[in-house]
Amino acid sequence: MLIKSLTMIDFRKYEQVTMEFGQYTNILHGENGAGKTTILEAIHSLAYTRSFKTRLDADLSRHGRVGYQLKGLFSDHQGDEHEVRLKVESPRKKLVSVNNKSLTSRAQIIGKFPLVSLTPEDSELTFGSPEIRRLFFNKLLSQVDPVYLENLQIYARILKQRNALLQAYTNNGVAIDRVLIATLDDQRAEVAALIHEARSKHLSEFKKLLYEAYGELETENSLKMAFISNVRITAGSIESIYRSAFQDSLAEDMRKGLTSRGPHRDMFTFFLNTKDLRKFGSQGEHKLVLVAIKFAEGRFLENFLEEPPVFLLDDLFAELDVKRSKMIVESLQGSHQIFITATDLADLRHHGLKLEGDTLQIIDAGKIQANG
């Protein structure tokens, strides 16, 4: 997969601009605030209908404007072109189309235009809360498994309804409809089992790719990843195990006014030399693991979708030494379309990037913005 061209209208600081990209390495160069990261945001928004920096479309509109428009021309590995348009008319109205066909849900575009982003915001993946890691793996698995995405959506609807009953009881003393909550838990157990089975299956493959990627970057430390179910899974029917766990936790849930058990509370944890990375890892160790996660993400998507993803690399070389920087660049160049932001081209050379040849395009983001 690659993106050949991009048009932005009233997106962040850009009033109206169109740019074309090279097939291999694209350097987005300029001072801080020139609009480099905005270009990456726009590409990500076309592929996933949202930015990697914010979920609020109002934050993305140019100052004084309501809404924005994006258009991108993608090309797959077979050479077929796909035009994606995203138009936000108001905080409540977002229109997405592919090849002039309007989409009715975000799920219809997930996995169609695979890309991997590595940005400063992604540091939360190893530093942040368990919810951030759940969101990452839900997004990843949803791209390769539409049934998994559908089950997540079903589970979320059931969970929302169940929590509303619990909160009404806890906060306002509204009597719990025991028949309804039992029915919801029966439905939830069935979907929870499917989610658990899909996570176990796909994450087994992801771990192999993660350990392989980390081993290419680091040989002295040992990385392990654990998928820890919120409900203890033993021998027997997984659906029955969930159903029993939901019944056992109902009294506690009624006291707290929330649902305490289920896959929405599963944990994904990284260990470096048997120690929890989140608690004990240094800045440099976190960055190496994050890069390995992103490499594994790209390989995972390519294996399942049979389409090489686009790599969006923002502030790639922070916390990385020159040796590992060169390894990363060499492994991506020539086989993927990559975008790298930079304020200093000399620093890119220092980290092993060759700034000449047919495989490279250098885009001055500040100049584009000024001309736009």
Image: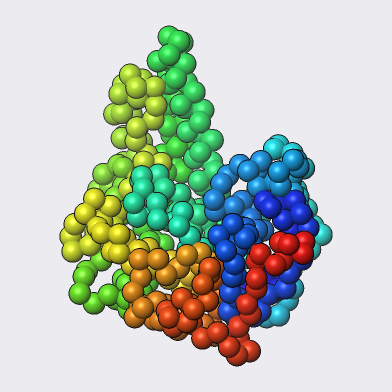
The answer to whether residue 235 of the structure is visible from this angle is no
Compared across the picture, whether 279 is left or right of 88 comes to left
The N terminus - image quarter = bottom right
Query: Which of the pair 76/250 is nearer the observer?
Result: 76
In percent of width and height, residue 124 lies at 40, 51
Which residue: 39% across, 22% down?
Answer: 257
The answer to whether residue 117 of the structure is visible from this angle is yes
* Picture layout, residue 178 above or below residue 76: above
Query: Which of the pair 352/213 is nearer the observer?
Result: 352
In percent of width and height, residue 345 lies at 53, 76
The C terminus - image quarter = bottom right
Q: How many marks?
A: 0
Which residue: 28% across, 47% down?
Answer: 233
How is this picture coloured? rainbow
Which residue: 69% across, 38% down?
Answer: 91
In percent of width and height, residue 286 lies at 31, 60
- Pick out the residue farthest to the bottom: 357
- Pick out the residue farthest to the right: 100
In percent of width and height, residue 51 lies at 59, 52
- Pick out the residue farthest to the left: 274
Which residue: 47% across, 82% down?
Answer: 349
Residue 360 falls in image quadrant: bottom right
Query: Which of the pair 156/312 is nearer the observer?
Result: 312
